[in-house]
Image: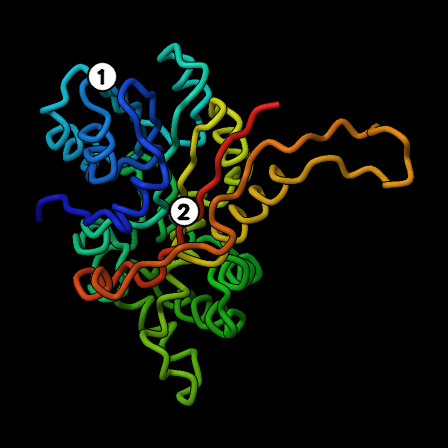
Amino acid sequence: MIAFSHKPVMLEECMQGLKLHSGGVYFDGTVGGGGHSCEILRRTAPDGRLIATDLDDDAIAAASRRLSEFSGRFRIHKSNFKNFASVLDEEGVDELDGVMLDFGVSSFQLDEASRGFSYMQDAPLDMRMDAGAALTAADVVNGYSREQLSRILRDYGEERFANRIAENIVRVRADHKIERTGELAQIAEESIPAKFRHNGPCARKTFQAIRIEVNGELSGLAEAVRGLTLRLRTGGRICILTFHSLEDRIVKNVFRDLATGCTCDKSLPVCVCGKKKEIEIVTRKPLTAGEGELGENPRAKSAKLRIAEKIGE
């Protein structure tokens, strides 16, 4: 088993975006290997506090080791960041000075074949962020109907050939259970017409879609982003790294809604909707990784960083 590793994407941009300061309370909802968390703690010394969550036991163990030098200033909960309210309540925290969310799959999860995330290596179909969760990729591939598979591939993978891939999955599994990532990747590849196979590995969208379904990545995401943003104190910042258009669209729409005040008809003498502007959007367009970082970490290519700041009355 390889050591858990995950190079933090757009590290400096995220740290600058958070406007870190000593004594602040910060939340890292996707701690991973602890890269962003470590820098948050380093830059908020001597008394900045960090609360973090993750579902991956290997990530939690690796992050705990990496952050050990900051003992007493952080705590990591095995939990989905979407459960932030109960985590923060347990920690006795009402307001946050900053929130960091990195929705990327870690290098470890991609490179460790046994986790089944990668279409580049043959392994059991798993894809669970939380190894103790019930639903696996094999369950989805072998148990979902053709219609369900097609919907997932279309909605979560934005796959043009979703119907064809779903049909071929159903055809193959009628003969035998599909249990390996290599076979699923081959089915996806062979389902796409040859003239459309020039934009990289053809299985990428299929694997993304099934991973999202297995881990419920988009379910409740908008509500969590909204809720965490509203837990910021005035002047607090939220930085969110997304890696595909579905996540980015959700974050963009939540930020846009929170940055919009009264929506009443302008002809009315007073506001009756009661909607108030909650944030200023710091990044009108998402930030992307620079050429130097892309040279060192090609996986940062699809990253988009959006930042918002909580405002007062």
Towards the viewer: 124 or 153: 153
Query: Which residue is at 48% across, 58% downward?
Result: 245
Name the residue nearer the viewer: 252 or 279: 279
Relative to 241, does residue 133 appear above or below in the rendering? above
Residue type, numbered disc 1 = Asp
Q: Residue at x 38, y 52 (%)?
A: 211
- Indicate the quadrant containing the C terminus: top left, top right, bottom left or bottom right: top right
Residue ID for mark 1: 47
97 lies left or right of 132 = right
- In the image, what residue occupies the spot 26% across and 24% down? 76
Total numbered labels placed on residues in the image: 2
Q: Quadrant of residue 198?
A: bottom left
User: Of helix, strand and loop, which one carries label 2?
Assistant: helix
Q: CA distance from mark 1 to mark 2?
A: 38 Å
Tell me if mark 2 has few (under 14), some (14-19) or many (20+) residues whose alpha carbon lies within 10 angstroms of its own: many
Give the camera-side residue of 13 and 225: 13
| x and y percentages locating residue 235 in the rendered image | 46, 28
Labels 1, 2: front one: 1
Residue 19 in percent (x, y) is at 35, 34
Residue 288, placed above or below residue 262: below
Q: Residue furthest bottom?
A: 195
At a point 48% along the width and 29% down the height, the residue shown is 228
First in sequence: mark 1 vs mark 2: 1
Q: Quadrant of residue 81?
A: top left
- Which residue is under mark 2? 214
In the image, residue 240 lies at what x, y percent? 41, 43
Would residue 141 be seen by someone viewing this image from the given angle?
no
